[in-house]
Image (tube, rainbow, N blue to C red):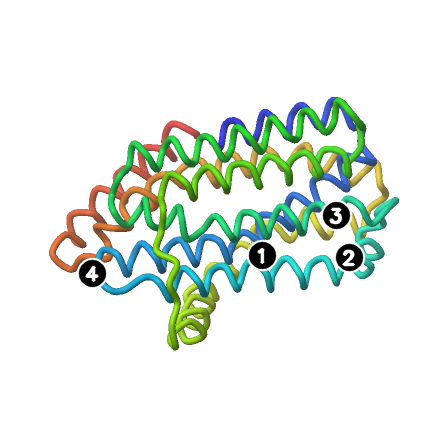
Amino acid sequence: ANALGYVLTVIAARVLGPAEFGAFSALLALIIVGNVAALAIQATVARDIVRELPTGDTVVGGLILAGLVGGLLVAATPIISAFLSLPSAAAAVAAGTAIAAMTATGPALGTIQGRERFHALGAAVAAQAGLRVAGGLVGMAVSPTAAGALAGMAVGLLIAGVGIWLLAQPPVHGGSGVWPAAISTLGAGGLLLGFVVMTNADVVLARHVLSAEASGLYAAGAIFTKIAFWLPQFVPLVAFPALADPNRRQSAMRLGLLAVAGSGAVLV
């Protein structure tokens, strides 16, 4: 899935040109930051399943958060467009839609992860990445702009979300605990949000501070940093259910650290 993501980025760097690629990369960084809500929902649902807690409220709360996140981002389109010097608001609207689609898919992925159906989880994550990349490539073929690429990505993510929900079939029967579950999920994502913001702020700020062409060149160089940073992401994804279980936590931590160290050694 990560490899597919970087294929899209490299092709976009060749097709879009520096100015459009700078805008594309800045909004892609925004999507990564916005995806924190999806990761928090996924982790919360997976944790509740491992601990054999009711997950209906968490799933419905996640869907509500998806709507709120998407709505706020679309409403902030004029501010985002001005800050990133975008030629049109269409790219920012497409990015907001993509984030909402990823967030709405979080409960389904969390259900599969919590049940430790790792073959199904691998297929779901790969399908989501594949449809995101395919949509982006088709969008660039139709319109070789940041807006075209992001609109295609948003469509791909929406299709993937529907398929993953059909695969997971998470419970959707919220009660009085929906809002507490949503607030708990936001709290779970707070630390991750700061972490992701710090690791993606440079590309966004480059678009704001540098010229359009220079920001595109910076974003192309930053691809290598992002590859090294995100490649070991599969380790906590697989280890998380065991980490949520006190009886398996120590061995999962030990094996996880060895796997991350191994990935780092290969990358270096």
Residue at the spot 36% in from the left edge and 51% down from the top edge: 170
| Image quadrant where one finds the C terminus | top left
Residue count near mark 3 (Cα–Cα under 10 Å), binned few <14, some 14–19, many ≥20: many
Residue at the spot 82% in from the left edge and 49% down from the top edge: 89
Q: CA distance from mark 4 to mark 2?
A: 40 Å
Q: CA distance from mark 2 to mark 1?
A: 19 Å
Position in image of residue 110 (x %, y %): 36, 50
Which residue is more in the foreground, 29 or 35? Answer: 35
Report which residue position mark 3 lands on. Answer: 206
Question: Left or right: 92 with respect to 107?
Answer: right
Lower position in the chain sequence, tag 3 or tag 1? 1
Residue count near mark 4 (Cα–Cα under 10 Å), binned few <14, some 14–19, many ≥20: few
Q: CA distance from mark 3 to mark 4?
A: 45 Å
- Between disc 3 and disc 1, the foreground one is 1
Position in image of residue 253 (x %, y %): 23, 50
What secondary structure is found at the residue carrying circle 3? helix
Lower position in the chain sequence, tag 1 or tag 4? 4
- Between disc 1 and disc 4, the foreground one is 4
Question: Left or right: 230 with respect to 206?
Answer: left
Lower position in the chain sequence, tag 3 or tag 2? 2
The disc at residue 197 is 1
Report which residue position mark 2 lands on. Answer: 77
Lower position in the chain sequence, tag 4 or tag 2? 4
Q: Amino acid at mark 4?
A: Glu
Residue at the spot 64% in from the left edge and 37% down from the top edge: 155
Q: Amino acid at mark 1?
A: Val
Q: CA distance from mark 3 to mark 1?
A: 14 Å
Q: CA distance from mark 3 to mark 2?
A: 19 Å
